[in-house]
Image: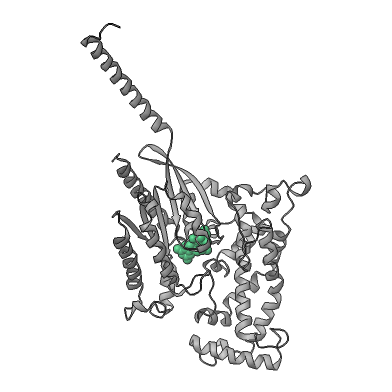
Amino acid sequence: MPPRTSTDQADAARINSQIDDDLRREHEVLKRKRPREIKVMLLGQAESGKSTLQKQFQFYYASQTLDRERPSWRPIVYFNILKAVRMILSEVDYEYFSNSPASPLASSPSTASLASVARSKISAAAGYGTGSPAADPAWLMELSQLRNKLLPLVASEDALASELSGGVTVSGGRSGVFVRAGWQALNTATRAWPLADIRHGGGGGAGPRAPVMMDIVAKTLDANQDEIEDLWHHPGVRALLATNKLRLEEYAALCPAPRPSRAFVSDGLRVCAWARAEDILHVRLQTLGVKEHSFDINMGGINYNWLLYDVGGARGQRQAWVPYFEDATAIIFLAPISAYDQYLEEDPRTNRIDDSLQLFTSVCTNKLLHKAALVLMLNKTDLLRQKLEAGIKVRKYISSYGDRPNTYEEVSEYFRAHFIQVHRRKDVNRRPLFAHFTSMLDIKATQSIIVNVNEAIMRRHMATVGLA
Ligand SMILES: Nc1nc2c(ncn2[C@@H]2O[C@H](COP(=O)(O)OP(=O)(O)OP(=O)(O)O)[C@@H](O)[C@H]2O)c(=O)[nH]1
Ligand SMILES: [Mg+2]
C-alpha cells in the first residue's frame, strides 16, 4: 500500500470530524425524541403519605387515568368506612360495656352501673362536668341501639376485604385490603372487583363473578347513613376521641356527614359508580411491595418519562426497596410530623417520629443512593395543627421537647431542625436537601410543591450528569 500523503490524512480527519458531527446531531435528535427516564422513589414509614403523593402526581400529570380508575376506588372507600365504624364500636364496647357478663351491650342494671363508672371517668378526663351530654342517662341506650343497627354492616368487613383482595390474606391479624400493581386498570365500570376472578378469567371460564359483598355493603351503608353519622357525633365517641382512647386513622374522616362519605355513599349508589377526587386522596389502601407509576412530563420542551416508585413503608416491606436504589434519580422522603403521639403498628414500642428519623438516617447514609437527589416532605401538617390545637402535648411523647411552647410554629420547626441535622451530620456526599412542609390532602398547595420539587430534581440531575 502506498504511503499516505498529508492530503490523504487531512481528508480522513475531515471525514472523521464530519461523521462525528453527524453522529452527534443524530444523537441529539434521538435524545429529544426518546423520552429520558427519571426514576423517583417515594420512601417513608407506613402511612406517611407516599401513595397519596403518588395520587397527587397522577392528578397533575395524568388526571384522565385517575378518572378511569374512579370506579375502582368506590369499594375501597366502603371498606375504609366499615373499618372505622368497627374500630369505634369496639372501643365503645371496651370502654363502656366490657364488664357485662352476658351481652356486651346489654342494658342490665349491673352493666349500666359499671358503664356509668367508666363513663364518668371518661367525662372527667375529657373535661366534661356532670350535666354534660355525656352524663345523660339515655346515653348508653343510644349507643347500644346504634351498635345493634350497625353490627350487620361491621360483620361484613372481612368478607368484603377478602372479596376485594381476591382471597389474598396477609398475616398479622388485622383485616385489610391488599392489591397488586395495576389493580386500578383491571377494575373499570364494566369490569369490577374481585381481582382474583378477573386475573384468572372467572370461575371455570364463566367470566368474572359479580362482586356480591360490594353490593351488599353498598346497600347496607346506604340504609345506615344516619346511624353512622349519629355514632360519629355521639358525645360518648367524641369523649373517647378527645382523650385519645380512641385513635382513628386519617381515612376515618370519610365517616362523618356531610363530608365525603355521605355524599359519596349516596352518589356512589344512586347516581354513578365513582369516587370524588377528595375521596380518592383520603382513602387508605396499604401498599405491598414496590409499585411503578409512569408519567410523561415535558420540561423545557423535552419529554421525560418519570417513573415513580411507591413502596410499602412497614418495616417488613423495607427490604424490597433496595434493588431499586442504584438507579434512583431522586428520593422523596415523607415524614408524617403529626405522628408524634403515635407508635409503629409493627413495633408498638417505637415512636413514629423516632422511626422516621432512623429511616431518614439510613437513606442519607446508604451508599447505593449517593447520587440521588434528596427531597424531604414533612407531611400531615394539617393534622399536626389539629392535634396541637386539641392540646395534645409533644413533651408527653418526646421528652427532649422539654418546655418549649406547644404551638404549630415551634413544633414544626423543632421537627424540621431534627431532620436537617440528620442530613447535615450523616450525608457524607453533602448533597443539597430540598425540604418542604406538606399537607397532602390540599390539592392546590401540593401541586405547586410538586412542580417546585420536579424542577429541583431536574436541575440536580442535569448537574450530576454534567449537562448543566
Ligand atoms: N390529614 C392528612 N391525611 C393524610 C396526609 N397524607 C396522607 N394522609 C392520609 O394518610 C393515610 C395513609 O396515607 P398513604 O398515602 O396510604 O400512606 P403510605 O405512606 O402510602 O402507606 P403504606 O402504603 O402503608 O406504606 C391515607 O388515609 C391518606 O389519606 C396529610 O397530609 N394529611
Ligand atoms: Mg402506600
Which image quarter holds the C terminus? top left
Image height of 466 relative to 69, above or below = above
Residue 357, position as x, y percentages in the image: 39, 66
> For the point 30% across and 16% down, which residue is it?
15
| Above/below status of 234 relative to 325 | below
Most distant residue in the front direction: 1
Q: Nearer the viewer, residue 53 or 78?
A: 53
Q: Residue at x 42, y 48 (%)?
A: 326
Q: Residue at x 66, y 91 (%)?
A: 112
Towards the viewer: 201 or 429: 429
Scheme of colours in the image: one colour
Horizontal side of residue 37 vs 149, given as left or right: left
Q: x, y percentage for residue 262? A: 60, 65
The residue sitting at the left extreme is 6
Look at the image and tell me whether residue 457 can be seen: yes
Total labels: the figure holds 0
Specify the quadrant that holds the N terminus: top left
Residue located at (69% from left, 84% from top): 105
Q: Is residue 62 visible?
A: no
User: What is the quadrant of residue 253 in the picture?
Assistant: bottom right
Residue 283 rendering spot, x and y as whole percentages: 55, 61
The outermost residue toward the top is 2
Where residue 350 sits: x, y (%)? Answer: 46, 72
Q: Quadrant of residue 445?
A: bottom left
